[in-house]
Image (cartoon, rainbow, N blue to C red):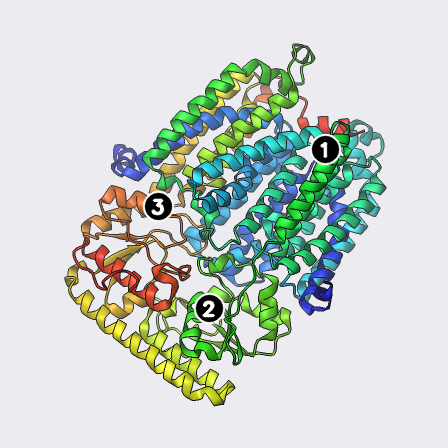
Amino acid sequence: MIDWLADPLAHGFTVRALIEISLLGLVSGAVGCWVVLFGISYSAESLAHGMFPGLVGAALLGLPLLVGGAAGIILAGLLIGLVGRLSGDSADTAIAVVVTSLFGLGVLLALSPESPPGIQALLFGDPLGVTEGQLIATALIGAAVLVVLRTGHDRFLAVGFDDAPGRIRGLSPALIQTLLLVLVAVTVLVGVQALGNLLVAAILVGPAAAARLLSSRMKSMILLSAGIAIFSGVAGLYLSFHARVAAGAAIVACLLAAYLLATLIARARTGITRMPPIRKEPADERASQLV
Amino acid sequence: MFEAFSLPFFQRGLFEILLLAVPCGLVGSWVVLRGLAFHSHAVGTATFPGLVLADGLGFAAALGAIGAAAAFTLLSVLIARSRRTGTDSVTALALAACLAGGVILASDVFNSGANVDTLLFGSLLAIDPGDLRLAAVVALIALGGSLLVGHHWLARGFDPGAARGLRSDSSLFDAALLAVVAITVVATLSAVGALLVSTLVVVPAATARLFTRRVLTLVCASVALVAVEGTFGLWLSVQTNAPPGATIAVTSGVAFGVALLARSRAVKRALRPLAMAAAVIALALLGTGCGTRSSGGDGPKVVATTTQVGDFVSEVGGEKVDLTTILKPNTDPHEYEPRPSDVQAVADADIIFRSGGHLDDWTDDLIKDSGSDATVVDLSQDLPVRLFGTGDHEHQGEDQTDDGEEFDPHWWQDPVNARFASARIESVLAAANPEEADYYRGRSRRFDNKITDLTDRTRTCIRRVPVGERKIVTDHDAFGYFTNRFGIETVGTVIPALTTEAQPSAGDLADLEKTIRSENVKAIFPEESVSPALSEALAKDTSASSDYSLYGDTLGPEGTPGESWLGSMKSNVNSIVAGMSGGRVTCFGGSGE
């Protein structure tokens, strides 16, 4: 048993992967709760493609790719917020419009012979290829994201639950939503670079959706979500090591298993006690706004 | 200006986009009204495991895509039954499940080749009759569904409470809507590819939605917008020689932006001229796309598919061929997207030289689509050295060449094959242009001498590395022919399969690390154009070097050592020998020479 736990720790790349997945699990566990509450999971999955023109632009201008990626992805987050506000349509539609247009622009820019091949993939990492620099970046940026979330907790809560008194206190819901999109964008950028796109989407949404089934208070939901993310991430890496399954996919499988377990627990609970009141879902809200 | 409309491949693309306008406009309206944009995007991406299965088990890719889309939709419906998870989270979870399944299938079960990605990159310039049929069928289904149960979809979207009164209270209706969206998306894959599906399915409907609140108007306007934006984008792509999918994406994105600004009252007066100016500038920028250049020589019109084949033809043909090479240096052959000038070049060609195997299997589509009657020469046929299987050589000798499934297509890494290809090109060119036969023969001889010289020098140089040290680790196994020729052992590869989606497992990587240590391998070779993250991480932990990169699937751009085949071979030999010997041995003075 001890060997089973200790063997992976003998390799540098697994140790770095374990640290990275724990750091990112903590951050995305927290950010993910807001993503789930605001109903913008689409952005977690797609923002990475929106940074494409930024990447190519940086390559053509000779700037570091990371700078271009950061500029592109933050621009995408801001544009989504703006389009969502101006069009009054659902966030999903805004995400689709912004991300596909930016991606198309990136493809056209990449036709330039100076742009390096496979540029999109150049910034997409694999959990087993994490570098020390990426660990430091994740720690620093993650800390900044958590500080912003902590500071703005009450405001996010007020807007997320469409709380009228909160609005009266002079908060612009559009601004809060855009701020959240930018936080998601930054998290996705760091995560995609270290872990790859598939994994980032899953770790942002899976643990938070699971925690939401088990908890009805935002703070406990955030803690639970971060815990699930870290535990599934570590379990996935051990699975990848011992059962020889592709690393990113193994972690995603563990995240999904955690979600399934949560649905079973939630179902078993309703048999004993009363189910906590169902929150108004953003999707329903949108539909009723349309009339 | 409108001569594009007379080109056959243009007409087929136009027909496809007009057919697709019906389901995309219809379904797009539902997608926008019901907030299903994420679902429509995710269905396209989630087809990946289906493509891997179709490739691994040998059935039609479209069937695999439809199967995976159905599985994804079913999964969404099942997860959605737990009411406390929002629909967008459900979609994200179902998508993650499908993609993770695809990655595991590709990396750990089938060792998939890169061809599993091809359906994810569609193009309006490579439409075949099957695509047109699928689009027509889907148009009928979308139309029928909207007419028969559209009012239920509407009622459930706007007011689930009232829907109960209208007998719309069945989640079956929602499932049907998700299914119709799914098949519409599958039909658009071959036109624009998975990442740009929303361009046709969401953006036009969202644009129309800005101006109308009535469903019928929305549907009609959306269908019209898809047709207009699609036609305009396709035409513009021919004018600017850009890929049509991306052109349509930017066109419809600009249209949406202009519509949004035009509608918003605050910016109406001040910004409207500005918005128009921005749109004009954006479209003008589109016009700066660059063309595929032909070499402009006089002689037969020749098309070469890959950069290596292009270099062989230019070595042999010199100024007496009019050569167009389709792949640009630095382009990953697996991510190739046809551009209008490519189709035109193929249509006009007298001779097409292709590299063969999965590296350029899109050539068949191009030839069919352009209606070309050129002589097609597949250089991978009848080569003196043919290896099978990527990585494991257990298939060696089995004759599975006919379906091309197991053939390792990187044949040019063996100089013996390069000499053979050069001779073959010479005889084909001489037959097509007998007056210049002597010219071709002379050039071919000279090239042959250079190859022989390179081979001899390489052999001498590798002999300076002790036998026990002739071991390398590469990240993809693209160098089987090279190592086979020069007696180098490939101890391992970092990435298990050729598709870009493949990932190694931590256990396999740990084993590779042990092997690198025990065999004392001094260098890991990342390939130019593949992300070096994994190789670097492994190199760091084993104190092997990952500083030497190799030219694998593509030659380098002009001005780099790898701009020609000879240069790329010299550069690879230098890197491999320096890497194996820990930098002690060098072969060719200066990397380019």
Mark 2 residue element: helix
- Name the residue: 71% across, 43% down: B255
Q: Tags 3 and 2 in contact by the CB under 8 Å rule?
A: no
- Residue B454 is situated, as x and y percent measured from the top left of the image, at 27, 71
The answer to whether any part of residue B178 appears in the image is no
Estimate the spatial distance between the alpha carbons at disc 3 and disc 1, rounded to whole Å.
49 Å
Q: Amino acid at mark 1?
A: Leu
Disc number placed over residue B271 in the picture, else none: 1
The mark that comes first in sequence, 1 or 2, is 1
Position of residue B22 in the picture relative to residue A221 (left or right): right
Asked if residue B542 lies left or right of residue A212, the reply is left
Q: Please identify the residue farthest to the bottom as the structure is shown.
A: B435
Identified by mark 3, the residue type is Leu
Which residue bears the numbered disc 2? B357
Which chain letter matches label 3? B
Dot 3: element: helix
**Residue under the image location 26 percent in, 42 percent down:** B540
The answer to whether tags 1 and 2 share a subunit is: yes
Q: Quadrant of the N terminus of chain A?
A: top left
Query: Label 3: which residue?
Result: B534
Q: Identify the chain of the residue marked 1, using the numbered disc in the image.
A: B
**Disc with the residue nearer the chain's start (3 vs 2):** 2
Answer with mark 3 or mark 1, whichever residue precedes in sequence. 1
